[in-house]
Image (cartoon, rainbow, N blue to C red):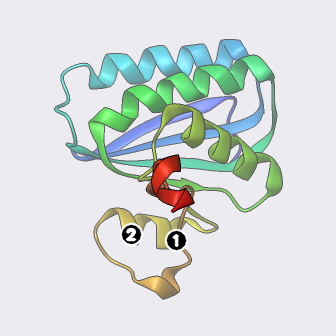
Amino acid sequence: MAFPGYQIERAVPDELTIRLAGVLDEATLLACERDTRMQLKLAKSGSLHLLWDLQQVTGYSIEARAVLARLQAFLTDKAGRTVYVASRPEPRSLALWAVHMAGALQARVAQELEPARAWLRGGGGPDTGVRPLASVRPPAALEPVEKAAS
């Protein structure tokens, strides 16, 4: 199904789906951000499962990318689970960048919609194809110079 720009769907109270399509520009993402924030201003922290459907994204501007990262940062607090559906390089790179810039390190990526939905709802295991977008490693322990020299 083709649609211009974005769609926001909330079929069940705890699940939000944001579909993006086409070449994304700043105006499109600003409208999406405004509409999303209006719908979720009263949502409690961690109360949502968020699915970003980027399957129909064909490109994006630098300005759109910045707005998406800001929206993801807002949604990181609202969402207990976040998954991006992106099977091609352009939308996948957009997802990686937004997650990195927003610090949404719990986010995942999937190539298909159904495994992504199953993971959001608490199902799925290592064979679902839902993978972490980012990981955090604890910083390496540094020893004082004096101790290392002895």
Secondary structure state at the residue bearing disc 1 = loop
10 Å crowding of disc 2: few (<14), some (14-19), many (20+): many
Please name the residue shown 60% across and 31% down the image: 6
Spatial separation of the CA atoms under disc 1 and disc 2:
7 Å
Find the residue positioned furthest to the front. 150
Q: Which mark is residue 119?
A: 2
Residue found at x 43% / y 56%: 138
Name the residue: 49% across, 71% down: 114
When the figure is inspected, residue 102 is found, relative to residue 123, above or below; the finding is above
Are circles 1 and 2 on residues that touch, CB within 8 Å?
yes
Residue 79, which numbered label? none
Above or below residue 24? Residue 110 is below
From the viewer's side, name the closer residue of 114 and 60. Answer: 60
The amino acid marked with disc number 2 is Trp
Q: Element type at marker 2?
A: helix
The image quarter in which residue 4 lies: top right
Relative vertical location of residue 16 with respect to residue 34 in this rendering, above or below? below
- Asked whether, in this view, residue 122 is left or right of residue 34, the answer is left
Amino acid type for the residue under numbered disc 1: Val
First in residue order: circle 1 vs circle 2: 2
Image coordinates of residue 51 in percent, x first then y, are 45, 50
Residue indicated by mark 1: 130
